[in-house]
Image (cartoon, rainbow, N blue to C red):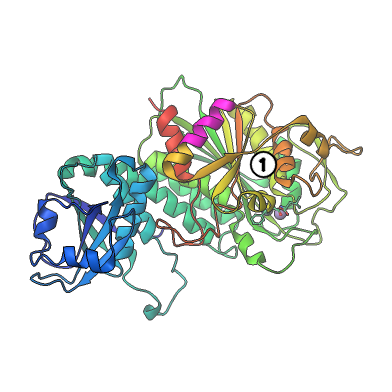
Amino acid sequence: MTEKPTVAFAKFAAPKKGSVILLAPEGCNLGQTAAVADPAGVLPKVFAAAEFKGKLASTVEVLAPQGTTYDRLAVVGLGKLDALSEQAWAQIGGAVAAAAKNAADVTVIVDVAGTEPSARDIANIGLGILLRAYVFDKYKTRKDDNGTKAKDKKFTIQCADPNAAKKAFAEASAVAEGVYLARDLVNEPSNVLGPVEFAARAKELEALGVKVDILTEKEMRRLGMGALLGVAQGSVRPPRLVVMQWNGGKSKHKPVAFVGKGVVFDTGGISIKPAASMEDMKGDMAGAAAVIGLMHALAARKAKANVVGIMGLVENMPDGNAQRPGDIVTSMSGQTIEIINTDAEGRLVLADALWYCKEQFQPQFMVNLATLTGAIIVALGNTHAGLFSNDDTLSERLAAAGAATGEKVWRMPLGSEYDKLIDTKNADMKNTGGRSAGSITAAQFLKRFVDDTPWAHLDVAGTAMGSPSSEINQSWASGFGVRLLDRLVADHYEG
Ligand code: BES
Ligand code: MN
Ligand code: ZN
């Protein structure tokens, strides 16, 4: 996994070297130590000249500040202190990491006249620093392409209660590791990451106390997973179904379950995709990456919850043994599916993964994540994931977790009018529903494999990869879903 920078916490003290970053609320009312960091008193003039007002995540920089021994003084705006969400604190952290540029030694001073951010707020600054510092550069061999490596950077956050901040940050750091893992896997090219290699990455979670079982093709055949196996049969690389279990809760509590689409590469199969941007389909396993990232986060912070994570790992290729349009496959549920378009493969993988999950674990709920449809990008762009659900409570909880973390979801409709669009005369259903409402008919398809289990489907095709750069993410892969679902678990399913 890409290594994180170091984030440490300390009491207020006048800084001596490196880069110094002050946080200033709207109005720029700094506390005493913050004032000491600017002995020559240049800041008021700098603020005026730069028209810096302390707006959320805005930045101003002073090089070689007068009367000091350090290289750089930067100020990052906090915005209005009474209105800051978890996401806003992380954005501030992101702006801090950006303001630090290539500096290896950075002192961050959180001293605001008259107000004391909570330990959790400070921890979220640390989270934002980690998320912003992530870079995927393992295949860049020329040194001059890269600045200071993330792992060689050290941020020391000065605040009123460093011990409390350190404790709160331990949890945030576990979540950041989960996001790093998800981003690494999505960024990784498919020649390196096939289903077998992906499953091996899951096995590494055993070091954190996660139970990991890997089902091979033979075992899936025995279980009757004809939908998943039909997708896999066009690739020389065999599929895997990974079952991860974290049992941190009371033994009598039924688990909650997360299921991810893990298509390591999606050519479309025989219904082959056009060449333009096909390389992006290395990220068609982002749902599975979010699930493994979430399991890492939960285990690393020892969440008091019982959680199952399942990943359906396949490659969708068009070789001589590939499935054809018109083929009819039998899923593990016994329901038959007519393949109309081999590019609608994610739902086939999830059909068997969801059914298996429900039969094996009878979970309190199932949430699946999938880069399922291009149509969700048309509908919602890159800022909200599509949320489809048969359960209002689960939907509301996901929406609240989205608002808190900034990994936003938007609920879309389901209904019998949409459901009948996937009926066919040749089998129980077909795998596409025509041009209209493509994301909804995909969700209706999944719904046929969950029975009465409370369930939500997150279509992350627009949010897990290719989103515009943000304060907390500069990488192609965002790791979308890890923070959202960690918050869902933390707020409702622990203890
Ligand atoms: N993996 C794609 C969806 C996708 C598209 C994800 C663009 C990210 C970016 C999925 O398997 C797919 O091909 N869906 C088809 C479904 C259609 C054939 C019914 C689509 O969206 O075009
Ligand atoms: Mn496809
Ligand atoms: Zn796909």
Disc 1 residue type (three-letter): Leu
Ligand 2's quadrant: bottom right
Query: Please, which residue is most extreme toward the right here?
Result: 425
Dot 1 falls on a residue whose secondary structure is helix
Q: Give x and y (percent) for residue 433.
A: 80, 44
Going by the image, does 481 lie left or right of 89?
right
| Residue found 51% across the figure and 36% down from its top | 399
- Residue identified by numbered label 1: 350
Q: Give x and y (percent) for residue 420.
A: 82, 34
Badge 1 crowding class, 10 Å Cα cut-off, few under 14, some 14 to 19, many 20 or more, is many
Q: Give x and y (percent) for residue 256.
A: 52, 30
| Residue found 34% across the figure and 41% down from its top | 83
| Residue found 58% across the figure and 32% down from its top | 366
Q: Which region shows up in magenta?
A: 392-400
Q: Give x and y (percent) for residue 84.
A: 34, 43
Looking at the rendering, in which quadrant would you find the C terminus?
top left
Going by the image, does 303 lie left or right of 469?
left
Asked if residue 398 is among those painted magenta in the image, a careful observer would answer yes
Asked if residue 429 is among those painted magenta in the image, a careful observer would answer no
